[in-house]
Image (cartoon, rainbow, N blue to C red):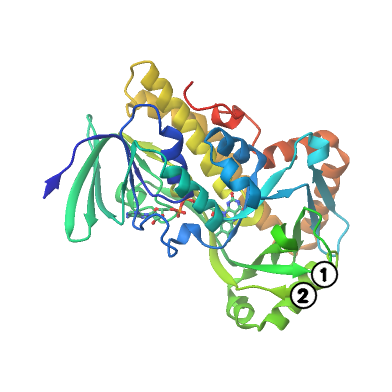
Amino acid sequence: MNTTPEYDVLIVGGGMVGASLAIALSGHGLRIGLVDAFQPGDPGQPGYDDRAIALAYGSRRIFEAMQVWPDLSGDAEPIARIHVSDRGHFGFTHLSAEEEGVPALGYVVTARRLGHSLIARLRQCADVQLIAPAQVQAVWSDAASAGIRVQRGEETVELRAGLLVAADGGKSFIREQLEIPTQRWEYGQSAVVANITPSRPHDNVAYERFTDSGPVALLPMSEGRCAVVWTVRDEHLDEVMALDDAAFRKAFQERFGYRLGRFLKVGKRSSYPLSLLRARESVRQRIAIIGNAAHTLHPIAGQGFNLGIRDVAALVDVVLEAQRDGADIGGDDTLQRYAAWREGEQRNVALATDGLARLFSNPLGMLRLGRNLGLLAVDLLPGARHRLARGAMGLLGRLPRLGRGLPPGA
Ligand SMILES: Cc1cc2nc3c(=O)[nH]c(=O)nc-3n(C[C@H](O)[C@H](O)[C@H](O)COP(=O)(O)OP(=O)(O)OC[C@H]3O[C@@H](n4cnc5c(N)ncnc54)[C@H](O)[C@@H]3O)c2cc1C
């Protein structure tokens, strides 16, 4: 068995969250290792598939500060307005970029396209060593370092670092090996996603529509297309996936209505089972858990990655502050500061997302009346709407340097 030199930071998971962390930490004299089961750019890497990602305005700021945005911006479709409604009922609310004084509330881009920009930027980071394809098979930590055992082809290597970051996704091997307890909500639902072309221009409006069978989102995309996220109960999933294109367009038209005219064309469909998971601890000795490994959300509010990139921004602040002050970047004090910072927002976003998913999937009359009144109240009270918009843009609470659009660590 080989042993390799130490790293300062070892990141497990080169998905959108882990790759972002490596880029944001680069350039500060740290020796960074990034481990993933897939070679960067491998079209089979599941985190970089064709799902549409709504990036909050706050995430754009972070990508600007990380110098990822210039490469991405040309393919990111702005969201000028968000329209939230309850299908066939009176409640609705709307949010607008103009009212909030921002160029866009957010941007829509596919995970695949975002992956191209992240990997291109990663290749400019000479201090990040890519260890891929490599499968992590064991993890441990002691007072001095954290370590992993990695299978790389025929070879097994041990890698150690002062700080190990688990960004290894919803089924996190590291979280499971450390037996970190989790809170789980199962929905018995799946998200069916596809691109669809409506006969009317989308005018950069994102629609969130609640229906008896679950929420439906339609996000504006380039070339006049929209991304569908249709929540389907598991017992209907096979039926919906088996529909031919014409029948799918018809069924979706019935759910969504005719606000964008007729749906003319639909692309390839994929489905994702939905559950919500939250790790009860986000740090252990010399280990931090971030992104989907720490919290996997229902995609109803498009917050999963946006929450993960805010983990990245906060972790970068505490690590670079510790480094600047000559403190231990993987020490308890540093990690506890990270955990305390992120605890509130992670809990609030998980609870709010779960509440929305349940409330708006429930056809009971009183609940429906309540939620319609709630939507109307949000619409009529500018203060409430403004707060909702700031939350959706990821601009509430204490913002890390990257979240304020500032370069890390300066
Ligand atoms: C249908 C759908 C729509 C969504 N829409 C939005 C949206 O609009 N906005 C938004 O913000 N979020 C959205 N999300 C959520 C978003 O996609 C996720 O939050 C994000 O992709 C998580 O990234 P991650 O890097 O944490 O995890 P992952 O993408 O899962 O990456 C984990 C990485 O770790 C690697 N790995 C795992 N185990 C090991 C191991 N043992 N050894 C080596 N490598 C390993 C994997 O290869 C992978 O590359 C959506 C999700 C879905 C399903």
State the residue in front, 50 or 292. 50
To which residue does mark 2 refer?
Answer: 264
Instruction: Using a 10 Å C-alpha cutoff, classify the residue at mark 2 as few (fewer than 14 neighbours), some (14 to 19) or many (20 or more).
Output: some
Point out residue 142 in the picture as x, y percentages from the top left corner.
22, 34
Of the residues under marks 1 and 2, which one precedes in the sequence?
Answer: 1
The mark found on residue 297 in the picture is none
Mark 1 C-beta to ligand 1 under 8 Å: no
Dot 1 and dot 2 residues touching (CB under 8 Å): yes
Q: Secondary structure at mark 2?
A: strand
Tell me what residue is drawn at x 78 percent, y 47 percent.
Answer: 80
Q: Secondary structure at mark 1?
A: loop
To which residue does mark 1 refer?
Answer: 199
Tell me what residue is drawn at x 40 percent, y 33 percent.
Answer: 26
State the residue in front, 111 or 298. 111
> Is there any visible trace of residue 384 in the rendered image?
no
Q: Amino acid at mark 1?
A: Ser
Label 1, label 2: how many angstroms apart (C-alpha)? 6 Å
Lateral position of residue 78 relative to residue 280, left or right: right
Point out residue 231 in the picture as x, y percentages from the top left corner.
65, 66
Instruction: Using a 10 Å C-alpha cutoff, classify the residue at mark 1 as few (fewer than 14 neighbours), some (14 to 19) or many (20 or more).
Output: some
> Is there any visible trace of residue 20 in the rendered image?
yes
Q: Amino acid at mark 2?
A: Leu
Tell me what residue is drawn at x 48 percent, y 37 percent.
Answer: 312
Point out residue 172 in the picture as x, y percentages from the top left corner.
38, 52
